[in-house]
Image (cartoon, rainbow, N blue to C red):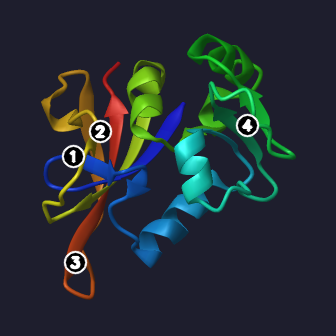
């Protein structure tokens, strides 16, 4: 399985259920990676994305809210149920796209992480596990440094060590 996240210098990813940054090239990169794939995310991230998922893809949302039942979406009510649903699809085509609790629950099942690293420290309340400090992960590829207005960022691909 794969995961995609944008993190700041402290591996922060969000505040109050919202992403910290909106970089157009990061969004394009993320969409390219997720094209015709199976996606797993939580209800907060689903809502912050407009509540309509991503067209042409199977959207799997983990939500314990019994009233949450969007159209054309597979809703799972627990980690185990989500894991069972994801087992139906090729693991290399599955992308975990957040939020924080989803990343923490599914990180051990993933073997590739596509991380956009933003060179800034944001005020945040949600963090991604720091892959640089986890011995089972290694950097496989890093893009050149990029800028968006005054924001500096890079794309980094991590792989789980075999």
Q: Secondary structure at mark 2?
A: loop
Label 2: how many Cα within 10 Å (few below 14, some 14–19, many 20+): many
Q: Is residue 130 above or below residue 107?
A: below
Q: Residues within 10 Å of mark 1 (few under 14, many from 20)?
A: many
Residue furthest right in the image: 72
Q: CA distance from mark 4 to mark 2?
A: 25 Å
Q: Which mark is residue 151?
A: 3
Q: Are marks 3 and 2 in contact (CB under 8 Å)?
A: no
> Who is closer to the viewer here, 16 or 39?
16
- Left or right? Give the position of 131 relative to 73: left
Q: Is residue 36 left or right of residue 133?
A: right
* In the depicted structure, whether residue 103 falls above or below residue 145: above
Mark 4, secondary structure of its residue: loop
Q: Quadrant of the N terminus?
A: top right
Question: Which image quarter holds the C terminus?
Answer: top left
The residues bearing labels 3 and 2 have C-alpha atoms spaced at a distance of 20 Å
Q: Earlier in the sequence, mark 1 or mark 2?
A: 1
**Residue picked out by circle 1:** 11
- Asked whether the residues under the numbered discs 1 and 2 touch, taking CB atoms below 8 Å apart as contact, a structural biologist would say yes
List the residue tagged with mark 2.
Answer: 128
Q: Earlier in the sequence, mark 4 or mark 2?
A: 4
């Amino acid at each position: 399985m794969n995961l995609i996240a944008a993190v700041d210098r402290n591996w922060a990813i969000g505040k109050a259920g919202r992403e910290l940054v909106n970089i157009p090239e990061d969004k394009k990169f993320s969409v390219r990676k997720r094209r015709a794939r199976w996606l797993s995310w939580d209800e907060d991230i689903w809502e912050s994305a407009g509540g309509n998922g991503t067209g042409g893809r199977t959207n799997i949302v983990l939500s314990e809210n019994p009233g949450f039942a969007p159209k054309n979406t597979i809703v799972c009510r627990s980690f185990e149920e989500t894991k069972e649903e994801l087992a139906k699809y090729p693991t290399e085509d599955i992308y975990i796209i957040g939020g924080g609790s989803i990343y923490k629950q599914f990180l051990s099942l993933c073997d590739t992480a596509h991380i956009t690293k933003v060179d800034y420290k944001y005020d945040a309340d949600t963090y991604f596990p720091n892959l640089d400090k986890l011995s089972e992960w290694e950097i496989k590829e890093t893009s050149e440094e990029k800028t968006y207005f005054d924001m500096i960022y890079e794309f980094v691909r991590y792989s789980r060590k075999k």
